[in-house]
Image: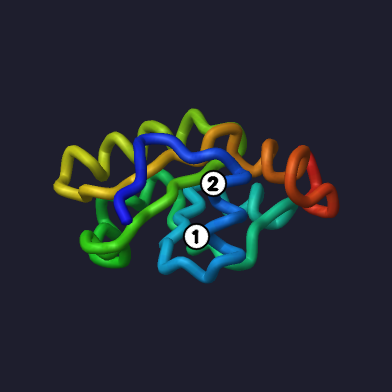
């Protein structure tokens, strides 16, 4: 399955519920993860992406997330420029996840 350039929290939830083989990368800072996180997401801070590319499989569907979708959009673009064919930004980030999917995830 190839992802588009952006995915909604509802689309991500559907993929997660279906146990689809999607790699979710959370590019927020450790202090942000201490407040709110999705247990199924891998944490690679935005500033470490370039040096940790080997942790992100090029042949996988990848969803990049952050707080509101701005940083993750930049990272998704960066990955596509480096040959990642199926990378989507999570529209609205963890804020949208909290508001629309799981209100137990704290808002900050």
Residue 43 circle label? 1
Q: Earlier in the sequence, mark 2 or mark 1?
A: 2
Extreme residue toward the top, this view: 70
Quadrant (top left/top right/bottom left/bottom right) for the C terminus:
top right
As drawn, 41 above or below 76: below
Going by the image, does 25 lie left or right of 94? left
Q: Which mark is residue 30?
A: none
SS state under label 1: strand
Circles 2 and 1 in contact, beta carbons < 8 Å: yes
Q: Residue at x 49, y 29 (%)?
A: 70
Residue 72, given in percent of the width and then of the height, sits at 45, 38
**Residue at the (64%, 59%) spot, across then down:** 38
> Compared to 39, does 49 lie above or below?
above
Q: Which residue is mark 2?
A: 28
Give the Cα distance between marks 2 and 1.
Answer: 8 Å
* Secondary structure category for the residue under label 2: loop
Q: Position of residue 26 (x, y in %)?
A: 51, 52
Give residue 2's position: percent from left, percent from top.
30, 50
Can you give x and y, in whole percent of width and height, for residue 66 in the image?
54, 42
Crowding at dot 1, Cα within 10 Å, few <14 / some 14-19 / many 20+, comes out as some
Question: Which quadrant of the figure contains the N terminus?
Answer: bottom left
Q: Is residue 51 above or below residue 67?
A: below
Query: Which sits in the foreground, 15 or 108?
Result: 15
Instruction: Locate residue 25 relative to residue 14 in the image: left or right.
Output: left
Residue extending farthest to the right is 104
57 and 46: which one is in front? 57
Q: Is residue 51 left or right of residue 62?
A: left
Residue sitting at x 29%, y 35%: 77
> Residue 39 vs residue 72: left or right?
right
Circle 2: is it few (<14), some (14-19), or many (20+) Cα within 10 Å? Answer: many
């Amino acid at each position: 399955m190839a992802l588009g350039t952006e995915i909604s929290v509802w689309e991500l939830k559907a993929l997660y519920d279906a146990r689809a083989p999607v790699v979710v990368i959370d590019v927020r800072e450790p202090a942000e993860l201490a407040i709110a996180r999705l247990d199924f997401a891998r944490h690679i801070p935005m500033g470490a992406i370039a040096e940790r590319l080997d942790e992100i499989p090029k042949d996988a569907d990848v969803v990049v997330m952050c707080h509101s979708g701005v940083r993750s959009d930049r990272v998704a673009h960066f990955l596509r420029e480096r040959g990642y064919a199926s990378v989507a930004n999570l529209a609205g980030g963890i804020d949208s996840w909290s508001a629309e999917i799981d209100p137990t995830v704290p808002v900050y």
